[in-house]
């Protein structure tokens, strides 16, 4: 492990991509294949391969307590070190006593990780972490903690590790990328590259592939400037979801590659009715099933409704009835033993239509007719439908696109997705083949009440701002934002906040409520996270309002007004 830690120091010391790749390649070639394979996983910033379900479940608070105990330093010393570094691993390297380690190999370290993952309860996990950190050097502890927290921060992404594997073992990058995508295991990919067997892997189901991402556009004219005869879909206010279905078994993954199947227990049985092994891409939304109204069979609800379903390991029948969901499918990535990523979107769309039409379960529905009009065979089917083909229109002029945009917003959706019919599916990439057109719901003028130190390139500056609106004579927090200001402006504001701190809580400062910001956001949700009872979704700082006094900030009544205008239509009782 010491050699890997020293290699990480070398990687962090250069900003040049080719040098980073060369350092990793040389290190991998110098290790035995089993050790190189585990190292590739660690260098990708995780303790276990992507496809595995194993998690450490050892959070930052647990690691902080162990570090405080082993270092013998008081908590303020650790907080001060964290302010300087913004990284728990770097803090460990500074505060742990210098010692000669046991020279544990990376394979032994991963075995220790597996024991920590298998341990039940924080006491058992803490004991194992303490034992590990007490047997290694501070430099090794630095990178072990970085791997445990998934925050390697040495300017190395998994894509660069793939390039290093190709360089080390004489493979093409395309071969390495394809094998890693199929397997979800960069360590196994390295083993295949080392034995010249990268052509062997087939799709390993039930690990998330990268999601293709969309680039924002500002206008209908820009939305049609990159390709012709665009495919157009509503942009729904839900969560992106990738469904893997094989042999009657179903798993659903979020865009962050988390398994979210348990949060939506009504979907797997429906998806299991698709007759072939398949990987689907779509959006899960809270859905209002308007039974008995043939011209309005259903619509998506705002994200605030769906939020009640997120993060739950057990979902009651009553909650499923109160907040029903739909899975709006718009792409298929794999079916019938074949990856479809390189096929154009128009072909993938036809394949998707065929798959859903052939589903054994009758409550898999297709959209027919105009954009946003979903028709069903019966009212009972409409009430039980869970998987829908996302409606698709076409537009060839800005006027057509504007009309579709207005209709999407009238349905309560965020805006439009604009897609090139000839586009392949590019996992994890954001280009100009898929575009998103949306407009901010509103902005609020808010007052900064607390600030926190940033991470990465923002170590040492106060870049995370908690802000509030007025409720009578008091301020009530409603959100937190860390994007929108330039580095120069953040540095300027850091100086101001340090000079106007009311209470120093270590990593967080309570500050004088004098700075007014204008923030934009997607919508407002009810939430107990803040004492206002609301939270802004995706808040972004538009500008500093030097022209406004704190007394002129928006009031809670304005937030309530915006919340009420979000076209929330509660689902009808079944």
Image (cartoon, rainbow, N blue to C red):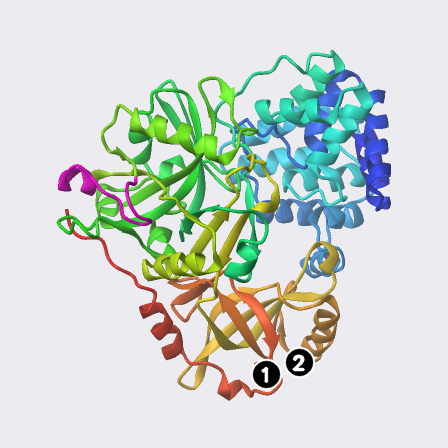
Residue 569 location, quadrant: bottom left
Residue at 53% x, 50% y is: 435
Q: Which of 387 and 519 is in front in this view?
A: 387
Find disc 2 in the rendering and name its residue.
500
Instruction: Name the disc covering residue 475, or none.
Output: none
Would residue 197 be visible to someone looking at this image? yes
Query: Could you tell me if the residues under marks 1 and 2 are in contact, i.e. CB atoms within 8 Å?
Result: yes
Query: Is 269 included in the stretch rendered in magenta?
Result: no
Q: Nearer the viewer, residue 531 or 170?
A: 170
Q: Which of 11 and 69 is in front in this view?
A: 11
- Structural distance between the alpha carbons of marks 1 and 2: 9 Å
Q: What stretch is highlighted in magenta?
A: 367-383
Q: Identify whether 380 is placed above or below 33.
A: below
Residue 73: x and y, percent? 73, 54
Residue 159 location, quadrant: top right
Residue 160: x and y, percent? 74, 35
Residue 221: x and y, percent? 54, 60
Secondary structure at badge 2 equals loop
Would residue 104 be visible to someone looking at this image? no
Q: Which of 356 and 477 is in front in this view?
A: 356
Position of 559 with respect to 227 (left or right) is left
Of the residues tagged 1 and 2, which is closer to the observer? 1
Find disc 1 in the rendering and name its residue.
514
Residue 129: x and y, percent? 64, 36
| Viewport quadrant of the N terminus | top right
Residue at 71% x, 21% y is: 190
């Amino acid at each position: 492990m010491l050699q890997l830690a020293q290699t990480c120091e070398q990687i962090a010391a250069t900003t040049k991509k080719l040098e980073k790749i060369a350092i990793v390649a040389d290190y991998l070639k110098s290790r035995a294949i089993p050790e190189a394979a585990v190292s590739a996983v660690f260098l990708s910033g995780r303790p276990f391969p992507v496809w595995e379900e194993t998690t450490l479940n050892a959070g930052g608070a647990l690691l902080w307590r162990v570090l405080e105990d082993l270092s013998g330093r008081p908590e303020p010393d650790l907080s001060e070190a964290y302010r300087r570094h913004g990284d728990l691993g770097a803090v460990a390297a500074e505060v742990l006593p210098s010692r000669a380690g046991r020279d544990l190999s990376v394979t032994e370290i991963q075995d220790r990780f597996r024991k920590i993952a298998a341990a039940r309860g924080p006491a058992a996990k803490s004991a194992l972490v303490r034992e590990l950190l007490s047997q290694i050097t501070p430099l090794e502890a630095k990178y072990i903690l970085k791997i445990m927290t998934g925050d390697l921060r040495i300017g190395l992404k998994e894509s660069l590790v793939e390039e290093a594997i190709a360089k080390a073992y004489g493979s093409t990058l395309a071969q390495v990328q394809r094998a890693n995508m199929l397997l979800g295991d960069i360590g196994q990919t390295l083993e295949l590259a080392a034995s010249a067997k990268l052509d062997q892997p087939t799709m390993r189901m039930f690990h998330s592939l990268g999601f293709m991402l969309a680039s924002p556009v500002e206008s209908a004219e820009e939305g049609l400037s990159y390709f012709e005869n665009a495919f157009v879909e509503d942009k729904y206010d839900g969560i992106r979801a990738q469904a893997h279905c094989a042999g009657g078994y179903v798993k659903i993954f979020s865009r962050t590659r988390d398994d979210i199947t348990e949060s939506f227990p009504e979907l797997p049985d429906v998806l299991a009715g698709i007759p072939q092994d398949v990987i689907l891409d779509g959006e899960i939304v809270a859905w209002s099933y308007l039974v008995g109204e043939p011209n309005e069979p259903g619509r998506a609800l705002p994200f605030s409704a769906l939020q009640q379903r997120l993060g739950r390991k057990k979902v009651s029948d009553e909650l499923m009835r109160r907040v029903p969901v739909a899975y709006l499918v718009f792409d298929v990535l794999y079916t019938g033993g074949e990856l479809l990523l390189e096929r154009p979107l128009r072909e993938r769309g036809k394949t998707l239509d065929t798959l859903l039409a052939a589903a054994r379960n009758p409550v898999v529905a297709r959209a027919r007719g105009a954009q946003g009009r979903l028709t069903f065979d019966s009212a009972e089917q409409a009430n039980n439908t869970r998987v829908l083909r996302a409606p698709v229109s076409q537009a060839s002029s800005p006027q057509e696109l504007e009309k579709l945009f207005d209709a999407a917003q009238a349905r309560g959706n965020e805006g439009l997705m604009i897609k090139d019919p000839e586009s392949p599916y590019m996992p994890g990439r954001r280009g100009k083949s898929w575009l998103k057109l949306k407009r901010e719901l509103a902005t609020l003028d808010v007052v900064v009440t607390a600030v926190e130190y940033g991470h990465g390139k923002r170590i040492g500056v106060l870049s995370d701002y908690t802000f509030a609106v007025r409720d009578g004579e008091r301020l009530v927090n409603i959100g937190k934002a860390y994007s929108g200001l330039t580095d120069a402006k953040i540095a300027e504001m850091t100086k101001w906040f340090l000079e106007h701190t009311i209470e120093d809580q270590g990593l967080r400062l309570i500050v004088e409520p004098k700075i007014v910001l204008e923030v934009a956001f997607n919508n407002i949700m009810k939430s107990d996270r803040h004492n206002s009872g609301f939270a802004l979704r995706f808040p972004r700082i538009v500008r500093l309002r030097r022209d406004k006094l704190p007394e002129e900030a928006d009031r809670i009544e304005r937030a309530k007004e915006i919340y009420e205008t979000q076209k929330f239509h509660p689902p009808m009782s079944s």
